[in-house]
Image: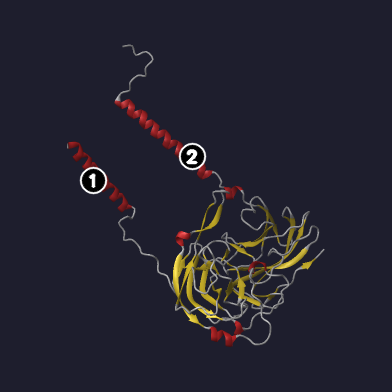
Amino acid sequence: MSEAGRHRKLGPLQRFFVRAGSVILVISALSVGNVVIKFTPGTDELGRPFLRAGEVSDKVDVREFEMTVLSARVGSVIKAPNKWEHDTQGKWVVLRVRLMMHRQARIVRYAAVHDARERIFHFSDRLDQPLVDGSRLLQPGIAVEADVAFEVPIDAVGLTARFAVNGTEFNRRLDAMSEIALPVPETAFLSPEPIAIAPLEVKP
Amino acid sequence: MLAEQTLGRWAAGVGAIVLAVSGVFGGWEKAEGPPPTGPGVAIDGGTWTVTLHDARLVGELGPMKLPRKENHWLAVVATIEVKTDETRPISGVIQLPETAGIDNDEDGLTSARDVMLMRDATIISQLHPGMPEKVVFFWEREKNSPVPSELRLVVTAWEYRENSLTQGNEWFPNEDAYTVASVPVLDKRDATASASPTTGPRPTPSTTPTARPSGSTSPRPTASARPSS
């Protein structure tokens, strides 16, 4: 019988090598894929906000608005515009902030302080904070100033102020966000004198 | 016959190997029962630790005005510590299963109407990491409901995982990790009625604590109006 046109029959050892080779190829492909996935940035990292860095008194362009932190105060008690006093187990960080929209009326919905341990402290909801609580529509070209209060633990240091237009994590992807370094000292002593929170003002 | 015996030996051998491997990875360790719950026990909710104290039936208290004056509040006192790295909303941390006298939600669990910070009787909607606080959850309760000796409630849990739609990581409720707990119920309606101030306006309760109106001039509640710890 002619063997022309037929596959050559493999011996037992050759069959073993062919099968082992197939298994090794599959394992290698999976391993390479795993390494590629491991070193490819995830969606959260790819979509992280663009930080616009600055310091106190700097005018920082946050794409849709301009932001200036005019001052930063730290204390153990604040006095809200409605005369309520609020203590804390940590410390209050009160920022005097000036915001102005560039071209479009928008609301600043994200205001937080980040610390050196990458903890995120949103603005306090223990008092009315109309500049950042979603109730104040900022008109283009009209600057508005207000105190914004944050409550952070005593051990929170290396603070930066992050403000952005979009409030939800999903909407903040690829958005611009401020990153203002705050000169908040690492001190155990906090003045018991209440920090007076000034009401929001339009400052053309 | 011989083939059956060989197969049996193989099966026994594989079973022994599986058991041995399972033992290496802790499969032979004594199974743990459900974690303890109840007053004074720290319940791990993934994103937070919740220590329940008690439940109280109270009248109007500080900023918590009753929408229907004839009713009363069911107030659950708890200490909550946020364990994540970011400020978390807390209004849904403790929820009530089907409970007599409560306007129960259709999905079976009812969130509190408001949460009050014990520290200064302000209505809050969030807590910050590293700053545990004693808070009170309020549900409105119908006036003629029988007074239970114990209240069953659910401590919810959330997990941070990938959203299959957006590919990003987000917080989702983890119902498998919910904890059912019971706390004693104290009837304090008479005490709160006598403790309420008789003069001067008090702040009105906020149904949307995150968006309180600006320029509010409501005064802070007096010490007598605040809940006793």
The residue closer to the viewer here, B134 or B101, is: B101
* Above-or-below relation of A110 to A38: below
Is residue A124 at all visible to an observer of this figure?
A: no
SS category of the residue bearing label 1: helix
Q: Residue A171 at x, y = what percent?
A: 64, 53
Which residue shows up at 40% across the image and 69% down it?
Answer: B36
Q: What's the amino acid at mark 2?
A: Gly
Q: Image check: A18 left or right of A145?
A: left
In the image, is B141 to the left or to the right of A159? left
Q: Are marks 1 and 2 in contact (CB under 8 Å)?
A: no
The residue depicted at 78 percent of the width and 59 percent of the height is A139
The residue drawn where x is 54% and y is 66% is B105
Instruction: In this rendered view, identify the residue nearer to me: B17 or B33.
Output: B33
- Work out which quarter of the rendered image holds the N terminus of chain B and state it: top left
Q: Quadrant of residue B194?
A: bottom right
Farthest-out residue, front: B144
Mark 1 vs mark 2, CA separation in Å: 37 Å
Going by the numbered disc 1, the residue's amino acid type is Ala
Residue A140 picture quarter:
bottom right
Which residue, given by chain and number where applicable, does mark 1 sit on? B12
> Residue B133 shows which numbered tag?
none
